[in-house]
């Protein structure tokens, strides 16, 4: 039984991402694809679990661009299709999306893109709504959980009416929070896929599919947007609440509309303020906007991060100035609403209080520190660190030592995955660049060419296994082809660990749990012409020596695969390889030479420091039994015994 099973007509409490899935099921979605990325991952996971029951095809694709292509194939063959990704993914998919926007789609196709304001689980807070405007696509933004379900269902109908892919944007606080959703009925009947391609190039339903001829297709694309405007003017997802002639008009979208409601309640100001909640945020419906701009002269725009709505509303207000009169905007550019980080009811209340001249005392800045001090806590403060038994700690330990032994001030270009924590001081601060998926290898390929300009530092890149398939392969091809003297270290922990162990092309099962042939990472690297070494990162000495050898060879691109299961993987979790102990008689502790080497320098959370005895010890509960610390202790005080 899937957690998307709901009784029609009844209210269920579900996560925003589940609500989106249920809406897709109610729309009769058949083909689903995506690439893992918080906060979007649960959409594909939930639909994959429901695949058998509801007759879907669901895949975790190798990257977002391919996932969009897979979903588009479904649409072009008459199957309603959905593609899901986080904000970074839209960048990756945008090349195909640009062309798909030009060609149009057939059966309903929805691209769900989930932004992460505040970068709670990202290394950026990119704003993917701009793609809708840039690529001339319609965009919807659900404002609560019911809308997440209802709007997703409607997005498929809209897509079919327009013959265009529809973007539906969520954010972390909608995707990951839970709320009430009344389920609707599920459609019945079989779906049969067929790609019609014998018509002319201009035959939308039966011809070949292309964004060419551009002059015709681009004009058609703009006609679709114009039709979207007509539909959005009437959309029930755009609502106004408040007095007919308010003192202030708030225009908002997404989960921010809930922050506005709460802030108005906190200030007891609902009678003074009108709220226009927009569910259709591109293209904006001008008649609706005009009608509401006429309500008052002061406009506050409440949205997160970049002023997407704000700028587009200001353009419309300027164009309509003769009809609506001059407007005073109180938004990001005017310093009322922050343009970085997440919003919350407190921040919105502060802005509203300022605009309405209400005395409002938000919690003082030092509130969090005072609350922390006042609350009794047994938690000891600790830095963000790799998990106990994480193979990345062992890998980075060896790479750090190899770079130090090499002695030429070499460095590592990082990449996106849980190993990105290697940039933090608590994880040796070993990563010196950190950007997009695959960028570490591309940067290392470039750094490797700078010897001709006197740069004598060796360079390495790291990548996870999922990232390798996603975006590293082209960069590695470049490094091999250009004879860049760099080393790529693939941290192969056999799954997409950071987002919850989703399968990737190197694993033996697909999203629906079916067996599939794994694409051999090592064979791919060798086929590309790279020299490949494979090591177990728990073997610190062998790993260090392999890394040193690679650093010494400045003639070509090389690959070191460090293969060891993630400590939290379903195969490894809770299973200790070793029983590990500290011999208090051998432990030097803080008394002499080692200066708590294991807890201070190596830093696995499974090692603790006992103040009373002045000795290290193993925390049996936390220790994952990898046995690596036994190789780290200079006094040989840590022993490991293999478990049977
Ligand atoms: S266990 Fe080893 S590394 Fe840790 S404090 Fe004792 S002697 Fe030092
Ligand atoms: S064996 Fe040592 S390094 Fe491994 S998890 Fe336990 S304490 Fe940490």
Image: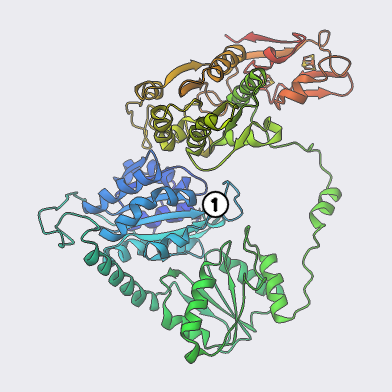
Residue that carries the numbered disc 1 in the rendered image = 176
Q: Please tell me which residue lies in front, 258 or 139.
A: 139
- 308 w.r.t. 127: above or below: below
The C terminus sits in image quarter: top right
Q: Is residue 56 visible?
A: yes
User: Which of 296/132 is in front?
Assistant: 132
Residue 237 percent coordinates (x, y): 44, 71
Q: Is residue 627 left or right of residue 95?
A: right
Asked which quadrant contains residue 247, the reply is: bottom right
**442 sits left or right of 406 in the view:** left
Structure colour scheme:
rainbow
Residue 507 x/y as whole percent: 40, 28
Mark 1: give few (<14), some (14-19) or many (20+) Cα within 10 Å: some
Q: Residue at x 49, y 21 (%)?
A: 561
Q: Residue at x 27, y 65 (%)?
A: 218
What percent of the width, then of the height, locates residue 488? 50, 26
254, 15: nearer the viewer: 254
Question: Which quadrant would the N terminus be assigned to in this image?
Answer: top left
Mark count: 1
* Residue 182 visible in rendering: no
Find the residue positioned furthest to the left.
Answer: 198
């Amino acid at each position: 039984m899937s957690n998307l099973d709901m009784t029609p007509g009844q209210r269920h409490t579900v996560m925003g991402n589940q609500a989106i899935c249920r809406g897709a099921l109610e729309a009769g979605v058949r083909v689903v694809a995506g690439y893992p990325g918080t906060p979007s991952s649960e959409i594909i996971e939930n639909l994959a679990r429901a695949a058998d029951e509801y007759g879907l095809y669901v895949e975790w694709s190798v990257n977002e661009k391919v996932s969009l292509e897979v979903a588009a194939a479904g649409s072009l063959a008459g199957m309603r299709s959905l593609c899901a990704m986080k904000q970074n993914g839209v960048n990756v998919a945008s090349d195909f999306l640009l062309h798909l926007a030009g060609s149009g789609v057939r059966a309903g196709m929805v691209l769900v893109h989930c932004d992460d304001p505040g970068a709670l689980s990202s290394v950026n807070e990119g704003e993917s709504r701009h793609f809708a405007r840039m690529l001339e696509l319609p965009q919807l933004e659900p404002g609560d959980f019911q809308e997440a379900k209802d709007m997703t269902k409607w997005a498929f109908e809209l897509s079919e009416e327009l013959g265009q892919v529809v973007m539906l944007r969520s954010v972390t606080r909608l995707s990951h929070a839970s709320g009430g959703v009344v389920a609707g009925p599920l459609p019945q009947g079989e779906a049969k896929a067929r790609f019609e391609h014998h018509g002319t190039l201009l035959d939308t339903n039966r011809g070949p599919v292309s964004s060419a001829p551009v002059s015709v297709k681009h004009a058609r694309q703009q006609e679709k947007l114009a039709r979207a405007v007509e539909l959005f003017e009437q959309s029930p997802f755009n609502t106004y609440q408040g007095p007919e002639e308010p003192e202030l008009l708030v225009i908002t979208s997404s989960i921010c509309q809930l922050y506005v409601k709460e802030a108005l309640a906190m200030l007891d100001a609902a009678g003074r303020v009108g709220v226009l909640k927009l569910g259709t945020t591109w293209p904006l419906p001008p008649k609706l906007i005009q009608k509401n701009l006429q309500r008052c002269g002061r406009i506050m725009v409440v949205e997160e991060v970049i002023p997407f709505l704000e700028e587009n509303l200001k353009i419309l207000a300027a164009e309509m100035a003769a009809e609506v009169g001059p407007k005073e905007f109180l938004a990001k550019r005017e310093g009322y609403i922050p343009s970085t980080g997440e919003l919350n009811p407190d921040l919105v209340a502060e802005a509203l209080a300022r605009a309405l001249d209400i005395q409002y005392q938000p919690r003082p800045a030092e509130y969090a520190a005072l609350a922390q001090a006042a609350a009794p806590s047994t938690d000891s403060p600790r830095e963000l660190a790799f998990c106990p038994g994480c193979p990345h700690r062992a890998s980075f330990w060896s790479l750090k030592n190899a770079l130090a032994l090499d002695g030429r001030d070499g460095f590592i270009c990082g990449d996106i995955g849980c190993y990105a924590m290697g940039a933090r001081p608590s994880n040796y601060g070993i990563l010196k660049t950190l950007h997009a998926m695959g960028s570490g290898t591309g940067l290392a390929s470039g750094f490797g060419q700078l010897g001709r300009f006197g740069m004598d530092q060796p360079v390495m890149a790291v990548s996870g296994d999922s990232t390798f398939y996603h975006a590293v392969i082209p960069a590695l091809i470049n490094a091999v082809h250009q004879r860049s003297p760099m080393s790529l270290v693939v941290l192969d922990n056999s799954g997409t660990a950071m987002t919850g162990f989703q399968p990737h092309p190197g694993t033996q099962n697909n999203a629906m749990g079916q067996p599939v042939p794994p694409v051999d990472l090592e064979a791919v690297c060798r086929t590309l012409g790279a020299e490949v070494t494979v090591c177990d990162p728990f073997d610190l000495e062998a790993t260090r020596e392999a890394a040193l050898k690679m650093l010494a060879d400045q003639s070509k691109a090389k690959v070191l695969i460090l293969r060891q299961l993630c400590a939290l993987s379903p195969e490894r979790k809770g299973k200790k390889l070793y029983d590990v102990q500290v011999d208090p008689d051998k432990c030097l502790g803080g008394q002499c030479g080692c200066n708590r080497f294991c807890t201070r320098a190596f830093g696995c959370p499974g090692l603790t420091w006992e103040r009373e005895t002045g000795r290290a010890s193993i925390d049996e509960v936390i220790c994952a039994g990898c046995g690596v610390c036994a190789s780290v202790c200079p006094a040989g005080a840590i022993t490991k015994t293999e478990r049977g």
